Amino acid sequence: MNGALNLVLIGYMGTGKSTIGRRCAHALGYTFRDTDRIVEIDAGMSVADVFATRGEEGFRRLEAMAIRRVASFRRTVVATGGGAVLRPSNVRELQRRGVIVLLDVAPSEIVARVSRSSKRPLLEGAEDRTTRVMEMLDARKDAYESAADVVVSTTGLSVAEASDLVLLAFREFVAKMDQRGNRP
Ligand code: S3P
């Protein structure tokens, strides 16, 4: 069981879940899946267009379906959308066969990374993106922390350095689980 566990990356927008996830998948010889991409394929349109045509609730429904699907995979690195862990049922699904790693990045670095992104509907229309990001981080902090098996802080790190830390944390956590994959 433990050798087949998924590595699930959670965290706010702009924390590098997809970039780091792809790199970790390569290092582990695992498949990589990004739940936003699955939603886009299922809906036949971009995440921004799903929000525009079906609203956030419509997006969350598709996201929950994507999560249910990837949660049944093995040896997969899963990059989730930043709001995926807001639904407790998503967290339970992801925990079934996965170790959940929270990518923690200083708010100032997040703001710098997402400040010019046009792909993030929840930040569109915000008068001040910094304030919006800070408010969302604050509102989500508990959900991120309680969903996480491990927290990896990657502020100021390169993608390569951050990926190495994630791999280390994943391997250490798996080593502490029992044969049946129960959490320490
Ligand atoms: C969201 C984050 C986005 C995407 C959607 C909603 C969120 O993913 O799922 O725009 O609620 O934080 P990224 O974290 O990959 O940007």
Image: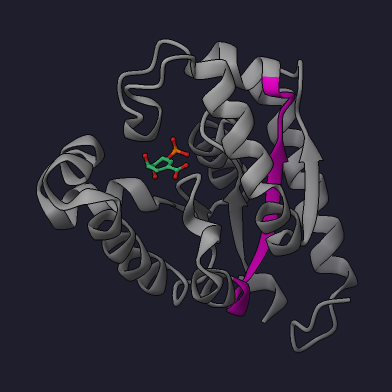
Q: Which is more toward the observer, 181 or 146?
A: 146
Quadrant of the drawing holding the C terminus: bottom right
Q: Name above or below for residue 94 compared with residue 24.
A: below
At x 69%, y 23%, the residue is 107
Q: Name above or below for residue 147 compared with residue 12.
A: below
Q: Position of residue 58 (x, y in %)?
A: 23, 59
At x 80%, y 54%, the residue is 150
Q: Which is more toward the observer, 172 or 114?
A: 114
Q: Quadrant of residue 96?
A: bottom right
Picture quarter with ligand 1:
top left
Q: Is residue 52 left or right of residue 88?
A: left
Q: Is residue 140 left or right of residue 150?
A: left
In the image, the segment drawn in magenta is 95-107
What colour scheme does the image use? one colour
Quadrant of the drawing holding the N terminus: bottom right
Q: Position of residue 74 (x, y in %)?
A: 51, 71
At x 80%, y 86%, the residue is 179
Outermost residue on the bottom side: it is 180
Q: Which is more toward the observer, 78 or 84?
A: 84
Q: How many marks?
A: 0
Asked if residue 100 is among those painted magenta in the image, a careful observer would answer yes
Q: Quadrant of residue 98?
A: bottom right
Q: Position of residue 108 (x, y in %)?
A: 69, 15
Q: Name above or below for residue 159 compared with residue 50.
A: above
Q: Position of residue 142 (x, y in %)?
A: 72, 55
Q: Is residue 117 left or right of residue 149?
A: left
At x 61%, y 22%, the residue is 110
Q: Is residue 145 left or right of residue 79?
A: right
Asked if residue 103 is among those painted magenta in the image, a careful observer would answer yes
